[in-house]
Image: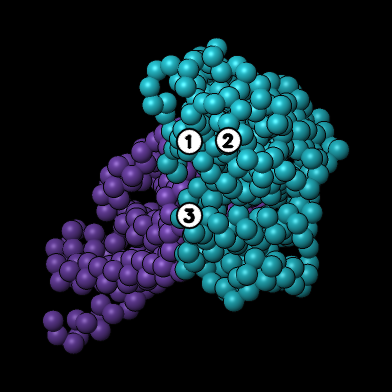
Chain colours: A cyan, B purple
Amino acid sequence: MITTSGLTKVYSSRGREITALDGVDLHVREGEVYGVIGQSGAGKSSLIRCINLLERPTSGTVVVDGQDLTALAGRGPRASRELRRARSRIGMVFQHFNLLSSRTVQDNVELPLEILGTSGKERSRKALELLDLVGLADKAKAYPAQLSGGQKQRVGIARALAGDPKVLLSDEATSALDPETTRSILQLLRDLNRQLGLTILLITHEMDVVKSICDSAALMEKGRIVESGTVGELLATPGSALAAALFPVSGDATGEDRTVLDITFRGESATQPVVSQLARTYNIDISILGAAIDTVGGLQIGRMRIELPGRYEDNVVPIGFLRERGLQIDVVGRTADRPALVKEGAK
Amino acid sequence: MNGAEFSEMWPLLSQACWDTLYMVGWSTLIAVVGGLPLGILLVLTDRGGLLQNVVANKVIGQLVNITRSMPFIILMVALMGFTRWVTGTTIGREAAIVPLAIGAIPFFARLVETAVREVDGGLVEAVQAMGGNTWTVVRKVLVPEALPSLISSTTTTIVALIGYTAMAGTVGAGGLGDIAVRYGYQRFDTQLMWITVGILAVVISAIQFAGDAAARALHRRAGRSGPGPRLRLPRTKEPEAADVSDVSKAA
């Protein structure tokens, strides 16, 4: 539904060049919720703005719903009629909602329809229908200043849906909201994704957002996509930084000469008594440092961090035993340095 | 003051009031019609603006600065040829409206520029993302969102114009300021002067009050949608300091 290839964006100011996007290849399938996560300055914002060409990419192409938007852009700095037409079929929601304070809620939702040239009667019918969909039918005549943050974002979502888009871009839509409201907004996005078959590309710095609604995710660092795939694929990738961040287990080795393993259970393997089997077969003492079970992207996942006596070299055989059981094993501290995903505060 | 004197003064004052309102009304109207697009253009053509055009921005900016740096009385003299071309005369109320309006256009344009720059750049981006063009952005975002400030700017312009009209008396345009100058300053009729000053004070207070009330009503309805990020509308000039001096210069 959305494909970017070789997307590059270089900002130049006062002779200095800053590469915000460095050859980004992104592929978002129809009907999925795709999350791009990264720290601020990683290029997420530039990426989402390049999708509807609010920012002109320096090079590379953007194809949305089979239409090459970069080809529509034209050469001048102003958006061509075709590009504006294409933009009206891509909804966008913003971190700071960007509602017009001088218009009522209903008039805000009608704004995209005014731009499309829809008749007055049809506009108000559609706006009320959308407000009903986002659960704000009673606030149609209110002004944005009278609403809470969560309600404002619901208006923002209703407005984004006014042009019947197939694609919704979400620019940190929940970053200015409290955790409770964040959950309800994410639930709304999830419902819209299912009910309307809406493809959603969202950018966020909150791992919880990816965890709760995304089918696929990509990790961005310094303008590049470092990892990407469906959540299931990511969790099955040994050493995946995203998987580790999506589903963290903590616990440090209790001393030197210990081997720490992260065991990931999925589906069937979760029911095997592997730890006791391991202890009995090799007659070793196993400490459990941490464990958790959670649902990530609709999958039941268990993860356990255990400690075996001896260095890695001494434990090659037991690790092989676990892998034979179909478990995913990550040896902590031996994989390439994981980029730490530190949570940052809302901008 | 005895009754006879007052009955002599009254027709003079009522005619002067009417002249002032006439001149201020028309020149405000023209100033708004001319200054609003000019002020918006100053923002749009600025670096990073939607219609970025450094040359046009510099030209408009300089034009505005030059007109504003001219004392009104000099402007009036300088524009005489143009005034004659427009109105067919250089004397009287109609003739005074031309320099008044031309003096007020750049004044109002700078105020518009400041007001429009205050509009959150995120709103502009949102409308662009909906497929809106620059004209849509101006019509649906910049003007309606800046409306409370634009009303305040209009009030300031009206008050400044009332000050300018005092000098319009030199071209025989009449008006309250003219009476104060002619009777009070030139004939030492301080009583009539103070009455005119009093009337002017009342008129200006009333206009300021009405303008503030209108701006406040709009502002309160809209509330403030929080300090969003101000994208692509960077501030470069400080017109406020100049505005203050302009008002004092005119008064």
Q: For the residue carrying disc 3, how many other residues have a C-alpha within 10 Å: few (<14), some (14-19), or many (20+)?
A: few
Q: State which quarter of the image contains the N terminus of chain B.
A: bottom left
Can residue B153 be seen in this snapshot?
yes
Q: Which residue is mark 1?
A: A288
- Inter-mark Cα distance, 1 to 3: 31 Å
Which circle, 3 or 2, is nearer the viewer?
2
Mark 3 or mark 2, earlier in chain: 3
Marks 1 & 3, CB-CB < 8 Å contact: no
Q: Secondary structure at mark 3?
A: helix
Can residue B173 be seen in this snapshot?
no
The residue at 68%/63% (across/down) is A110
Q: Which residue is mark 3?
A: A179
Mark 1 or mark 2, earlier in chain: 2
Q: To which chain does the residue with label 1 belong?
A: A
Which circle, 1 or 2, is nearer the viewer?
2
Which quadrant of the view contains residue A154?
Answer: bottom right
Q: Which residue is mark 2?
A: A275
Q: For the residue carrying disc 2, how many other residues have a C-alpha within 10 Å: few (<14), some (14-19), or many (20+)?
A: some
Residue B207: % across, % down: 35, 68
Residue B225: % across, % down: 46, 57
Classify A239 as above or below A184: above
- Inter-mark Cα distance, 1 to 2: 9 Å
Depth check: give the residue in front, A128 or B136: A128
Depth check: give the residue in front, B226 or A173: A173
The residue at 42%/29% (across/down) is A252
Residue A130: % across, % down: 70, 66
Q: For the residue carrying disc 1, how many other residues have a C-alpha within 10 Å: few (<14), some (14-19), or many (20+)?
A: some
